[in-house]
Image (cartoon, helix red, strand yellow):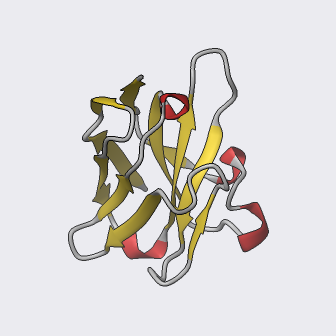
């Protein structure tokens, strides 16, 4: 099993940047595919970005492509999301998630992930 905890959320103005970190505890972090999701008030949970066991394979939602960057450090057991050019529509609670068996065609599906953090709030004001 793996336990996940997000940090780094906060409030910024439009165009600002934030960096989120997900710290994992437990065994074999490197064996998990990792992802970021977000949920805005009144909306469904939305895929943001994923990174496979190999850090060279990253996938992004169209809405964040070119603005957000996901990375991982398997030695430090951390997952990061660098968010630049933030917009009010990026306001959400951001969650990190882990799966030991997600296939490439399902990386955007929340139900493909077995472990979740508690979330961190990101608020972007205009």
Q: Is residue 124 above or below residue 34?
A: above
Name the image quarter holding residue 62: bottom right
Q: Residue at x 65, y 40 (%)?
A: 46
Name the image quarter holding residue 118: top left
Q: Residue at x 38, y 68 (%)?
A: 71
Q: Is residue 25 visible?
A: yes
Between residues 46 and 69, which one lies in front from this camera angle?
A: 69
Between residues 12 and 3, which one lies in front from this camera angle?
A: 12
Q: How many marks?
A: 0
Residue most toward the left? 76
Name the image quarter holding residue 94: top left
Q: Residue at x 78, y 68 (%)?
A: 105
Residue 24: x and y in percent read: 31, 55
Q: Is residue 99 visible?
A: no
Residue 74: x and y in percent read: 31, 75
Residue 84: x and y in percent read: 38, 51
Which quadrant does the C terminus fall into?
Answer: top left
Q: Is residue 30 above or below residue 70?
A: below
Q: Residue at x 72, y 72 (%)?
A: 104
Residue 72: x and y in percent read: 35, 69
Residue most toward the right? 105
Which quadrant does the N terminus fall into?
Answer: bottom left
């Amino acid at each position: 099993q793996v336990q996940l905890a997000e940090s780094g959320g906060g409030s910024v103005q439009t165009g600002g940047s934030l960096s989120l970190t997900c710290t994992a505890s437990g065994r074999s972090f490197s064996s998990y595919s990792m992802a970021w999701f977000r949920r805005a008030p009144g909306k469904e949970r939305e895929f943001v970005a994923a990174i496979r066991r190999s850090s060279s394979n990253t996938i992004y939602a169209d809405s964040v492509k070119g603005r957000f960057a996901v990375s991982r450090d398997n030695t430090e057991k951390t997952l990061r999301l660098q968010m630049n050019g933030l917009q009010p529509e990026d306001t959400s609670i951001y969650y990190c998630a882990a799966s030991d068996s997600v296939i490439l065609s399902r990386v955007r599906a929340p139900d493909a992930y077995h472990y979740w953090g508690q979330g961190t709030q990101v608020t972007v004001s205009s």
